[in-house]
């Protein structure tokens, strides 16, 4: 029975399962039907809304398309209008170019016609000029070349006259501006310095207490005078000059040693060879000290320092050296002062100018012992004792032997000329003086246009009388310049020479 109940239970279970399944299926089918209905409704709504949106978008797109088309049409219209305007402008320009080309063609034709007319006129003019030249040559009696030369001569005279006038104006202007300053500098420099000068000589005179001393100086058989001459290198001249002995020699230092020795011997009274030798040695030491002191005093006075001791000694030797009666040491000091003063006035280097001025004649200290000019000797000495090249260049050109390389060098040359040319600074022999005056007049008289010349004021001025029929008033300026250049190139002279040219025409008659 149990299996029966089991079967029944199973059948009941199966029936329940199927009943539940059928109920569930029914509910599912109902649910699905509802879902399908809802889905259909949703789909229908979506399709309706999509259709509405599509229609809205399509309407908007059509409106945008119409707007864009309208804007495009307007832009195309504007472009077309602009293109039409440009076409019209180009057409106008083409018309203007065509008109200009037509005008140019007409002008070219006119120019060609004018050129032909001008060429014809030139041919006619050349022919007329040739006929005119032939007629002028017949009338004047001159050929074309002769007339041209006459014209050139006239033009040359006019140009020379104008050039002379221009030169005179320029010189006057320069003189007005430069003379005052130059005179101020030079006069100020001269007034602020002074130097003593002695007469140039190659002899020294030693006074004697009496004429008996002459015999003692000569000595037995002349042994004393021979000893003095041998030891000093100086000649003793004992003549009829009362109470005086003359010492003659070209070396001023040796002559000074001989003078001091002889004076010491005269004071001592003992004159014999041994004593002479002793006094000469003492005099040599004394002269060496004097030279050293003179050199040191000169450098101290000028303000030049750090010189080589040998250069100081050579400067001191210049105390016994003269040139045309002017003491060379005093001259060197004066040149240093002048150059330094002018350098200061011109804002140059006064130290360099003073140093070169003091050393510019250093070669004269030994020029009687060494061959060569004192300039070359001085340059060698300065190089030997390590002086700067600037000092060597400044001193080397003071006589024009070498090129002037600095403004200080020009000042040294100017100061040297000032010191030498200052009235009373130097003297020259009568023969040299006469020759210089004669040469000065000869230079002037050999110049074309000069009738007569006269050297006046001790050769510092030459007065020239020009021929009035050969030189006019304007050309005397050129004549004066020409003579000045000749004097500068052919004559050596101290200072400057004034060239004074006169021209006049005189007419003299007598009433009777």
Image: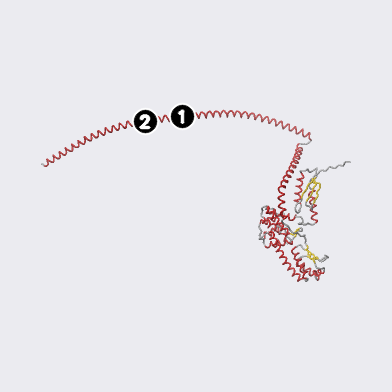
Location of the C terminus by quadrant is top right
How many neighbours does mark 2 have within 10 angstroms: few (below 14), some (14-19), or many (20 or more)? few
Per the rendering, the mark at residue 74 is 1
The mark that comes first in sequence, 1 or 2, is 2
Per the rendering, the mark at residue 229 is none
x and y percent of residue 58 in the render?
37, 30
Find numbered disc 1 in the image and state the secondary structure of the residue it sits on: helix
The image shows residue 60, relative to residue 458, as above or below, that is above
Location of the N terminus by quadrant is top left
User: On the image, numbered disc 2 is attached to which residue?
Assistant: 56
Find numbered disc 2 in the image and state the secondary structure of the residue it sits on: helix
Can you tell which quarter of the image residue 97 is in? top right
Residue drawn at point x = 36 percent, y = 30 percent: 56
How far apart are the alpha carbons under marks 1 and 2? 27 Å
x and y percent of residue 174 in the render?
71, 47
Q: Nearer the viewer, residue 38 or 174?
A: 174
The image shows residue 82, relative to residue 464, as above or below, that is above
Q: In this view, does 146 lie to the left or right of 391?
A: right
The image shows residue 453, relative to residue 232, as above or below, that is above
x and y percent of residue 378 in the render?
70, 58
């Amino acid at each position: 029975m149990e299996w029966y109940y089991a079967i029944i239970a199973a059948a009941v279970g199966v029936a329940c399962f199927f009943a539940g399944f059928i109920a569930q299926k029914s509910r599912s089918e109902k649910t699905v039907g509802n879902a399908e209905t809802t889905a259909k409704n949703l789909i229908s709504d979506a399709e309706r809304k999509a259709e509405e949106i599509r229609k809205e978008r399509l309407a908007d797109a059509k409106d945008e398309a119409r707007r864009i088309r309208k804007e495009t049409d307007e832009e195309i219209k504007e472009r077309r209008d602009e293109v039409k305007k440009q076409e019209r402008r180009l057409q106008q320009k083409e018309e203007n170019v065509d008109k200009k080309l037509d005008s140019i063609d007409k002008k070219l034709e006119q120019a060609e016609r004018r050129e032909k007319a001008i060429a014809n006129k030139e041919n006619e003019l050349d022919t007329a000029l040739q006929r005119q030249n032939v007629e002028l040559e017949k009338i004047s009696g001159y050929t074309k070349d002769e007339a041209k030369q006459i014209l050139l001569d006239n033009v040359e005279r006019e140009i020379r006259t104008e050039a002379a006038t221009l030169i005179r104006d320029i010189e006057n202007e320069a003189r007005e501006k430069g003379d005052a300053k130059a005179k101020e500098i030079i006069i100020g420099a001269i007034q602020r310095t002074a130097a003593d000068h002695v007469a140039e000589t190659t002899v020294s005179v030693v006074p004697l207490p009496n004429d008996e001393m002459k015999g003692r100086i000569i000595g037995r058989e002349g042994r004393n005078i021979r000893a003095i001459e041998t030891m000093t290198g100086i000649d003793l001249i004992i003549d009829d000059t009362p109470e005086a002995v003359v010492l003659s020699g070209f070396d001023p230092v040796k002559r000074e040693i001989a003078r001091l020795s002889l004076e010491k011997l005269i004071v001592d009274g003992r004159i014999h060879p041994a004593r002479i030798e002793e006094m000469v040695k003492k005099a040599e030491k004394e002269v060496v000290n004097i030279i050293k002191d003179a050199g040191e005093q000169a450098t101290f006075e000028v303000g030049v320092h750090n010189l080589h001791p040998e250069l100081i000694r050579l400067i001191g030797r210049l105390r016994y050296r003269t040139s045309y009666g002017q003491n060379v040491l005093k001259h060197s000091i004066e040149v240093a002062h002048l150059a330094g003063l002018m350098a200061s006035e011109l804002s140059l280097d006064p130290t360099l100018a003073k140093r070169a001025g003091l050393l510019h004649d250093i070669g004269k200290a030994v020029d009687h012992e060494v061959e060569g000019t004192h300039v070359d000797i001085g340059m060698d000495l300065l190089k030997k004792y390590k002086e700067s090249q600037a000092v060597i260049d400044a001193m080397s050109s003071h006589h024009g032997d070498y090129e002037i390389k600095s403004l200080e060098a020009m000042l040294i040359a100017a100061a040297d000329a000032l010191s030498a040319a200052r009235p009373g600074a130097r003297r020259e022999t009568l023969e040299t003086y006469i020759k210089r005056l004669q040469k000065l007049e000869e230079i002037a008289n050999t110049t074309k246009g000069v009738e007569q010349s006269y050297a006046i004021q001790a050769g510092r001025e030459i007065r020239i009388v020009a021929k009035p029929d050969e030189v006019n008033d304007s050309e005397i300026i050129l004549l004066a310049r020409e003579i000045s250049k000749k004097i500068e190139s052919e004559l050596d002279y101290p200072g400057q020479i004034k060239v004074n040219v006169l021209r006049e025409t005189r007419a003299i008659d007598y009433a009777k």
